[in-house]
Image (cartoon, rainbow, N blue to C red):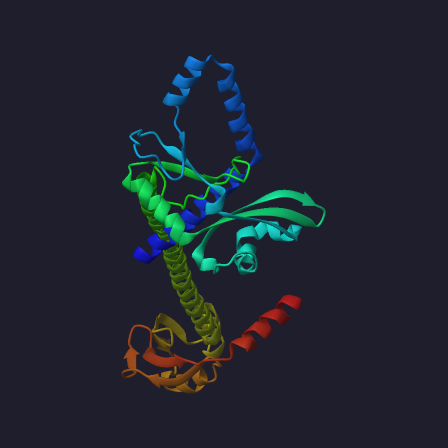
């Protein structure tokens, strides 16, 4: 967290320096200051002095006077010998990264290392592919001593400008960032901005995670519903396959044995004219039992065995004589013979064609 706050603080500080440098070098700022000065100069002297006293800034020359009790923010003016001014010609493309380029060129124009200088650069004009740049530099040690002395005297610095040899202001600001009149409020602002950035980052991360969690839960619900539907479809498919299999099995079983009407027709053909059937029952779909009377019951076994759909023909019980009819009572038991269902289908097809 501390590392993130430091990164945010350094980024904000760099942005403030860049914005402050651009505003200090802008033509809009110089024109606005000149316009305000002209307007104040047109006012009566008493009113102009009152406005200047009630203004937000005042002008101070270095070194400071012995008595300095005014609490208004001040712009400190350094004499020309306290600063070093150079005009440098650079390629126009270097203006986009002016401070970075000048850091590598300072030792060629000033007798100090780049780390020992505090500089401000501004572009004076551009001529085609080249640009005229004014560089104002002050030794860092001297600038720190000046800022410390102003703070000890209770002077709230707003900016530090430099006077040229003719006593004219250069229009630059050499005040280090964070050392001005509102340094404490700027530091607090930086801290609050850092905390706000951290809170926003955490909020964005939490929002992103919450949305991803919602999407995950929605996907899981969808997958569960689809899985349940697939399970129902598989169950229905299994039930359908079982029903189709049972139906096919019953159809095959039914086709593999003769029907009751076919069985009666066969018995009518196999039995003689003196033989008749009084009872007939079919058990388990394959066991048939029939009983009746015949003039020669003992010969029924041979005739019934000639039926193509019956096998394992045998008597059930004993043959008894019936005095009222003069015939013999019998009871036979047999099994239905299984046959190839395709033969029946072929026979049915042939019958349909004929």
- Tell me the quarter of the image containing the N terminus: bottom left
Q: Position of residue 10 (x, y in %)?
A: 40, 52
Q: How many marks?
A: 0
Residue visible at 56% across and 58% down? 105
Q: Is residue 260 above or below residue 181?
A: below
Viewer-side residue, 286 vs 155: 155
Q: Position of residue 191 (x, y in %)?
A: 31, 45
Q: Position of residue 55 (x, y in %)?
A: 39, 24
Q: Is residue 151 above or below residue 339?
A: above
Viewer-side residue, 49 vs 21: 49
Q: Is residue 343 above or below residue 25?
A: below
Residue visible at 39% across and 83% down? 296
Viewer-side residue, 268 vs 126: 126
| Residue 28 in sight here | yes
| Residue 207 in sight here | no
- Tell me the quarter of the image containing the C terminus: bottom right
Viewer-side residue, 199 vs 47: 47
Residue visible at 28% across and 41% down? 152
């Amino acid at each position: 967290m501390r590392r993130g706050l430091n990164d945010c603080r350094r980024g904000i500080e760099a942005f403030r320096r860049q914005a402050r440098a651009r505003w200090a070098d802008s033509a809009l700022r110089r024109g606005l200051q000149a316009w305000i000065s002209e307007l104040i100069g047109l006012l009566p002297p008493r009113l102009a002095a009152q406005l200047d006293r009630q203004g937000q800034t005042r002008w101070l020359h270095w070194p400071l006077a012995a008595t300095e009790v005014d609490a208004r923010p001040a712009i400190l003016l350094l004499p020309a010998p306290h600063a070093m001014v150079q005009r440098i010609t650079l390629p126009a493309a270097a203006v986009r990264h002016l401070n970075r380029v000048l850091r590598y060129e300072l030792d060629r124009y000033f007798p100090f290392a780049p780390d020992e200088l505090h500089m401000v650069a501004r572009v004076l004009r551009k001529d085609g592919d080249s640009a005229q740049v004014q560089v104002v530099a002050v030794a860092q040690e001297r600038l720190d001593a000046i800022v410390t002395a102003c703070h000890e005297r209770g002077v709230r610095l707003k900016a530090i400008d430099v006077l040229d040899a003719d006593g004219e202001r250069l229009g630059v600001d050499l005040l280090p960032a964070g050392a001005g009149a509102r340094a404490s409020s700027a530091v607090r602002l930086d801290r609050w901005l850092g905390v706000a950035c951290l809170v926003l980052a955490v909020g964005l991360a939490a929002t992103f995670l919450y949305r991803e969690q919602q999407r995950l839960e929605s996907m899981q619900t969808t997958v569960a519903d689809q899985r349940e539907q697939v399970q129902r479809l598989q169950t229905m498919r299994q039930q359908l396959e079982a029903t189709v299999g049972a139906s096919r099995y019953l159809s095959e079983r039914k086709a593999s044995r003769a029907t009751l009407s076919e069985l009666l027709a066969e018995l009518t053909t196999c039995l003689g004219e003196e033989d008749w059937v009084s009872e007939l029952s079919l058990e388990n779909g394959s066991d048939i039992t029939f009983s009746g009377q015949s003039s020669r019951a003992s010969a029924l076994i041979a005739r019934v065995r000639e039926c193509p759909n019956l096998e394992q023909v045998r008597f059930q019980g004993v043959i008894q004589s019936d005095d009222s009819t003069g015939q013999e009572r019998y009871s036979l038991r047999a099994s239905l013979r299984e046959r190839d269902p395709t033969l029946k289908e072929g026979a049915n097809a042939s019958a349909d064609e004929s």
